[in-house]
Image: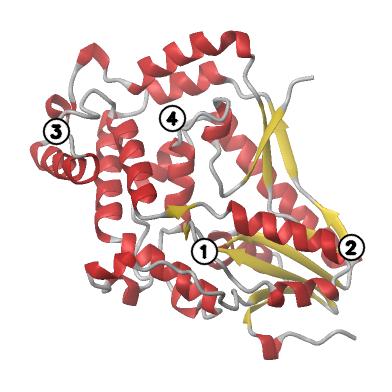
Amino acid sequence: MVPIQKTVLSRTLLFSLVVEMPFLTFISLTLFLLSISSLPSHAQEIPDDMDVIVVRSRLPGPPLWRVSNGDNEVLIFGVVEPLPKSFEWDTRRLERALTRADAYLSAPEVGLTSINPIKIVRMLRQLNKVKRNADGKTLEEILPNDVYQKFSSARLQYFGDREKLERLTPLFAADAIFKKVMDQADLTDSQKIYKTADKLARRADVEIRSVKVTERVKRKALFNDLRNLSIDDQITCLSAVIDLVTDHVGSLKVRAEIWAEGDVSPLVTPAHPPLAPTCVEMFTVNEQLNRILSTVKVQWLEAVEQSLRDNQTTVATLRLADVIESKGLIAELARRGYSIEGPMREDATPSPG
């Protein structure tokens, strides 16, 4: 039986396509950029020395959003990312919601079949070719002078090397810088939060529902799509990613602290357009991945609507971007006529019974 590698929609996706090897996180990068496309204005003004913040104390955790249809409701637990690796939060608010729930809906997931181990050597050779510029060109030859200077400064700052990454495509150079900066900043994805929420639901002994779409990934088509990406779009993406990690790492940590304190209002109102729309647009180039993500979103919305018909109270987890953004899943539920309230604080959450 072929094993399945699954991932929550907002977590690393392409990482799972290549047998858990951390050398290809393009989809992770673009989904991450989607989830932080609007930083709060006050966070953008935080001085550089704030990037040493690490959240270690137990904080109350975020409030819940409420989607309702008459007397029936779905309480949405929106999860922010990235988070400090040492991050802890008080789970009692979520636990109280689960004690009065009839069901729990986990975050949407994509199931991806693992690669045949026999073919892994060939796949690695193909990947190495995809990662490198055609005709042996260097980034110095490809990038405009201003972008190359920006890239060189970031490379020296984060890698301490004047030659590293030089022969990678702009996209994979962006990916390498992104991963390096997140690691040095002690930031990671939100898997721990999702796993904790799932565990609390099992402990509460409520019905657990999940939405998963599983397919065998067509790697040949995926690699061809990556190979054929516009070089101009890749350059734009690289420049935007360098700006992001250079200017906003401190803000990302502050966002996590705000979320943990339960006051997400500064995160709800976008302060500016998306940081790297070109990176996000490139993500849609692969037809299969685009279709898989569209399918899992549709099925998750259907599951919420069924819960609103069948259950008095359901608790659901979802990435924060899909809760607060105008094109997110909660906005889609509002367009379908459901009532949206939130964020809800402790005193606004109905008590059991």
Q: Is residue 99 above or below residue 196?
A: below
Q: Which residue is under mark 4?
A: 23
Residue 55 is left or right of residue 313, and the answer is left
Q: Quadrant of residue 228?
A: top left
CA distance for labels 4 and 1: 25 Å
**SS assignment at label 1:** loop
Secondary element at tag 4: loop
User: Which residue matches tag 1?
Assistant: 87
Amino acid at dot 1:
Phe
Circle 4 packing at 10 Å, graded few (<14), some (14-19), many (20+), is some
| Residue nearer the viewer, 6 or 74 | 6
The residue pinned by badge 3 equals: 162
Mark-to-mark CA distance, 1 and 3: 34 Å
Q: Residues at badges 2 and 1 in contact (C-beta under 8 Å)?
A: no
Looking at the image, residue 82 lies above or below residue 335:
above
Density class for disc 1 (Cα within 10 Å; few <14, some 14-19, many ≥20) is: many
Choose between 113 and 198: the one closer to the eye.
198
Tell me: 110 left or right of 1. Answer: left
Residue 339 visible (yes or no): no
Badge 1 vs badge 3, beta-carbon distance below 8 Å: no
Alpha carbon separation for disc pair 2 and 1: 26 Å
Tag 2 or tag 3, which sits nearer the N-term? 3
Q: Residue 167, how many percent across, how many down?
A: 23, 23
Q: Residue at x 69, y 77 (%)?
A: 93
